[in-house]
Image (cartoon, rainbow, N blue to C red):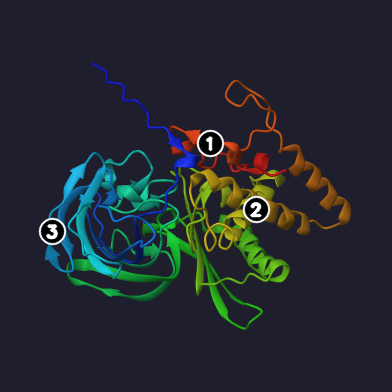
Amino acid sequence: MTQEVAATVIHRADYTAPAYWIDTVDLAFDLDPAKTRVLNKMRLRRNGHVPAQALKLDGEELNLARVLVNGQGTSFKIEGNQLVLENLPEGTDAFDLEIFTTCAPIKNTSLSGLYVSNDSFFTQCEAEGFRRITYFLDRPDVMASYTVTLRADKAKYPVLLSNGNLVDHGALEDGRHFAKWVDPHKKPSYLFALVAGTLVAREQRIIARNGQEHLLQVYVRPGDLDKTEHAMNSLMASVAWDEARFGLPLDLERFMIVATSDFNMGAMENKGLNIFNTKYVLASQATATDADFDGIESVVGHEYFHNWTGNRITCRDWFQLSLKEGLTVFRDQEFSQDMCASPSARAVKRIEDVSCCAPPSSPKTPAPWPTRCGLTATSRLTTFTPSRSMKKDRKWCA
C-alpha cells in the first residue's frame, strides 16, 4: 500500500525569528562509513525578542544516544523529525547543549548531508542537509562559529578537510589520525562542509595586497592532478580580481576546492571549502573545448565570490536566495568580462550573458520573467536551491 503524505506549504509571510540563537558549535566526528559518531557541543541562548518556548532542533536519519544541558541529563521528546527540549534554563543567559548521535553515510543515497562516494566522505548541506548530520536549528538565519575535529583511519582517509583554518593535526592510536579546523567567521549550517578520503592537491601560495600569505589548494583523486592547472589559475585570478575590483580580500589562511564525480550540484560555496563536480574543475588541452575552459573560470569565480556575497552576508530565509545568487552572478559575469582580452570580446561576453536571462516559458514557468524573489509560498525547498546546471541563476539576473 502506498501512503501519500500531504506536503507542508511554506509561506514567505509566515517567517518568524528563531526562538534561540546558537553562538558556537564544536563538532567531533569519528568517521566510519557504516557508523559515524558525531558529538555536537553548542552554546545557545534564548532570543529575548521572541516569546519563551521549547527548543526544536531538526534532524533526519539520526540515531540519538545522549542529550545533556550544562553537563546534566535532561528530558526530551521526538516529534516527527524534531528533537524537542522544554526544560531549559530560563532567561537569556547562554547555556551548553551536548548531543551525541550516529549516522550511516554509506546508506545515504540522497547526496544530502554526509555521504560516501568512491570510498571518500563528502557533504552537501544546502538547503537542509545539515540536519542529516546532527540535530540543529537548520535554517540560514542562525549563524554560529564552528570548530570541527575529524578522526578517521589514516590509511583509508589520509586527507581530512573542513571549513576554515587548520589549527592542529596528528596521529592517534590504532592507525587513526585527526585534524582540527576552526572557522573564525560565523556561518549558517548550510555552508558546513567535510571531506575525507584519498586525494592529492595542486597548491599555490599567494600574497594579498595587504601582505598576508594565503594557501590555495585544488584537491582531486590521484591521476587527475594534471587536469587542475586551469582551475587553479581561475581561482588565483578570482582572488586577485575581487580584492582589486571590490576591495574584498580572502579572509582565511587557505582556500580549498575539492572535485568529486558524485555531487548533486555543479558546485557549492561552502565557506573556505568549495565542493565541485569534476566537470567544473578538470580540463586538459587535449580534450576540453573553449566552452569547457570558460565554464570552469566562471564557476570557480562564482563560488569564490560567494565568500562575501552569500557566506559572510547571507539570506534570512530561502525566499531570499535569489538576492545572494543574483548579486554573485553579476559579480562572476563582471569577472568573466574583465578576463576578456579586448573590449570587443567583453561586449560579446556580455551579450552571451544577457541571452541567458530569459528562460523559455513552460507549464512550470508560465511567466516570461519568473523570479524566485517573487515566490510567496512553496511546498519544497528544492524550488529554491540552485539548478544542477551551473548556468544556475543567470536567468535570474537581469
Secondary structure at numbered mark 1 = loop
User: Which quadrant is home to the N terminus?
Assistant: top left
User: Which quadrant is home to the C terminus?
Assistant: top right
Residue type at tag 2: Leu
Marks 2 and 3, Cα distance to the nearest angstrom? 45 Å
- Front one among 345 and 394: 394
Q: Percent from the top left, x then y, of residue 386?
A: 54, 42
Which of the two marks, 2 or 1, is nearer to us in this view?
1
The residue pinned by badge 2 equals 327
The residue pinned by badge 3 equals 74
Q: Residue at x 43, y 32 (%)?
A: 379
- Using residue 212 as the reference point, say whether residue 195 is left or right of it: left
Q: Residues within 10 Å of mark 2 (few under 14, many from 20)?
A: some
Q: Is residue 284 something one can see in this rendering?
A: no
- Using residue 13 as the reference point, say whether residue 297 is left or right of it: right
Secondary structure at numbered mark 2 = helix
Q: Is residue 39 something one can see in this rendering?
A: yes
Marks 3 and 1, Cα distance to the nearest angstrom? 39 Å
Relative to 334, residue 378 above or below? above
Q: Residues within 10 Å of mark 3 (few under 14, many from 20)?
A: some
- Using residue 172 as the reference point, say whether residue 291 is left or right of it: right
Q: Residue at x 52, y 43 (%)?
A: 319
Work out whether mark 2 precedes mark 3 in sequence or the reverse, and give the earlier one: 3
Q: What label does residue 376 carry, if any?
A: 1
Q: Percent from the top left, x then y, of residue 296?
A: 63, 51
Q: Residues within 10 Å of mark 1 (few under 14, many from 20)?
A: few
